[in-house]
Amino acid sequence: MKIGIFGNSYQSGKLNNIREIFEKLNSLDVAVRVESLFFNYLDGELDYRPVVAGIIGEDAVDLDMIISLGGDGTFLKTTAWVARQEIPIVGINIGRLGFLAYVSTNEIEQTLEKILHGNYSIEKRSLLEINTANGIRTSNFALNEIAIIKRDTSAIITIHAWLNDDYLTTYLGDGLLVATPTGSTAYSMSVNGPIIVPDARNFVLSPVAPHSLNVRPLVIPEDYKIRLKVESRNSNFLVSLDGRSEIFLSGTEFNIRKADFSINLVKLEGHDFYSTLRNKLLWGTDNRVFNESPDLTAI
């Protein structure tokens, strides 16, 4: 089996976990390839040079699976590299929250055993694609959200929105998010957007600090086409795709739609969306109630 490993440069206290992963994979006779920047970080900053079969650069490489080491930010960067290659990704959380990178450090060995024995399934996640007349310098897709945000702390921006060429409304405020179900538990949730289960076929438009009391998040079918025209008194604004940001001039129009490819997430037994909600977001936590499945036989 050929496995790639991606990581970040904020893991100085996680060397033991990193070493455990490499040693376990080597003991299972896995051909391990490491993303070049992460390998240089391990070698230079952590003084650790793992045994690897090769280094991953910017070009596509033949891999059966990718392990993302870090938090959700690392997972999203890994997603940007994978793009259309459809290589399954599993996230091991040696970062912070870890909603996408849901495997904890105390599950490393059993997780790698399950992967090597094929005890996992694949969950496909939808992405957003954005286009504009002058093009996008960064990768033009997002797994979590596309954020259109003002650049300073003063003037609001104006965003005219159309759905399938029908005028929707004009948003006045700090910005607008277009989020996938995957991204509904990220930035969109922080601005009171709804949580959407991963296999729902919807996107959500969530305004950021709207200058109106009657503007609320809107859930739409994923096959809708979204057109936005953005105006700013400060002549420019920011567009962020899963944290990859670019500056655009006032008056720019964007077309957003569902991307024509998916990201393959590795789903392990014992991990599901609802348990992640409970464990990571403390969903429904109440000291008066046991946080476990009810005994339905008593009903």
Image: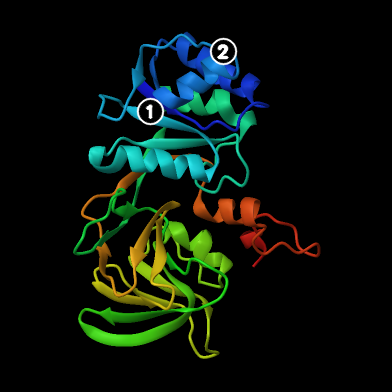
Q: Name which residue lies at 59% across and 13% down.
A: 47
Give the image location of residue 14, x and y in percent: 64, 26
Q: Is residue 100 visible?
A: yes
Give left or right: position of 159 versus 98.
left
What's the residue at 41%, 67% (across, down)? 237
Mark 1 falls on what kind of element?
Answer: loop
Locate residue 115, reporting x and y percent.
43, 27
Rendered position, 270 above or below 196: above
Comparing 145 with 290, the one in front is: 145
Q: Nearer the viewer, mark 2 or mark 1?
A: 2
Residue 46: x %, y % from top left? 60, 18
Give the x, y percent position of residue 51: 46, 8
The mark found on residue 118 in the picture is 1
Give the CA separation, mark 2 to mark 1: 29 Å
Quarter placement of the N terminus: top left
Judge whether 170 appears above or below 186 on screen: below
The residue most toward the front is: 234
The crowd level at tag 2 (other Cα within 10 Å; few <14, some 14-19, many 20+) is some
Observer-nearest of 13 and 236: 236
Q: Which mark is residue 48?
A: 2
Q: Amino acid at mark 2?
A: Tyr
Instruction: Tell me if 237 is positioned left or right of 226 in this view.
Output: right
Residue lying at 49% horizontally and 82% vertically, measured from the top left: 216
Q: Residue at x 21, y 60 (%)?
A: 134
Tell me: 278 left or right of 132.
right
Q: Is residue 131 above or below residue 42?
A: below
The C terminus: image quadrant: bottom right
Residue 1, can we see it? no
Disc 1 crowd rating (10 Å Cα; few below 14, some 14-19, many 20+) is few
Query: What's the amino acid at mark 1?
Result: Gly
